[in-house]
Image (spheres, grey):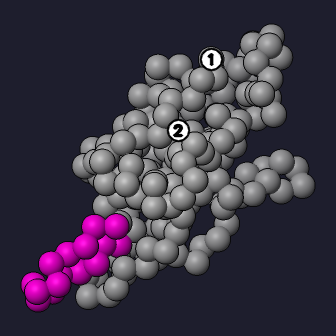
Amino acid sequence: MKLSERYRILDEVASGLSYLHSSSVIHGDLTGSNVLLDESAKSCICDFGLSTLIAEVQDTSSNSCVTGAVRWTAPELYKVGDPDQDGAAAPRPTVYSDIFSYGRVMLQTLSGEIPYHYLRTDGQVFFELYRNSFPRRPFQPWVTDAHWDLMKECWIGVPEERPTLVRIQDFVRTYYELLISVPSINDIIDGE
């Protein structure tokens, strides 16, 4: 897959998430396998089984609906409240947890491998999340320091410090527009 196609996918996924969030919907289970390409190769976000309305998320009386793929799920969604404390609510997906997942989709899209591809079990991934360890940086030359820094920002442990979708879209579009304006770069770096 050409590098420009990878960036187009990332841009379309960010746009789709932005649309969902502007409609007060949180996806809650964004993974690489939940991004499909239609017959014209346009990216579509699917699998809204865990999506919730933002108003529902703010209702802390309901149970957590986290059952998604651990390699893409924000670690705060696995935190357990004090069961002895009245009103201790289970964590719910948020705009910030969708941003975390987007960072993992970005990693997968640019590297061609799932996050923590070198770990066999979800238990091993949980351990890495517990230790606040990021997936290994991909070796591909097009994953620059700027790309890696943005991905790591998406995975920051304090959800409110993660980048906005506007910032992510600006970053991705800048690279996408560069690639389509200088075709020779896109031809040299043809994915894997």
> Above or below — where is 70 with respect to 171?
below
Say which amino acid is labelled 1. Pro
The image shows residue 8 at horizontal and vertical percentages of 70, 38
**Which residue is most to the left?**
85
Relative to residue 146, is residue 43 drawn left or right? right
Q: Residues within 10 Å of mark 2 (few under 14, many from 20)?
A: some
Q: Is any part of residue 15 visible from this angle?
A: no
Q: Is residue 162 magenta?
A: no
Q: Residue at x 28, y 67 (%)?
A: 79
First of labels 1, 2 by sequence position? 1
Q: Which mark is residue 169?
A: 2
Q: Residue under circle 1?
A: 141
Say which of 137 and 11 sits in front: 137
Q: Describe the element under mark 1 as helix, strand or loop.
A: loop
User: Where residue 130 sits in the image (x, y, percent)?
Assistant: 31, 54
Left/right of residue 12 with respect to residue 2 in the rendered view: left
Local crowd at mark 1 within 10 Å, few (<14), some, or many (≥20)?
few
Number of numbered discs overlaid on the protein picture: 2
Could you tell me which residue is drawn at 66 percent across and 27 percent down? 176
Q: Residue at x 51, y 55 (%)?
A: 71
**Residue 116 percent location from the top left of the image:** 53, 45
Looking at the rendering, the stretch of residues picked out in magenta corresponds to 78-92
Above or below: residue 57 compared with residue 180: below
Residue 29 % position (x, y): 53, 66
Residue 84 versus residue 40 in the image, above or below: below
Q: Seen in the image, is 61 located left or right of residue 164?
A: left
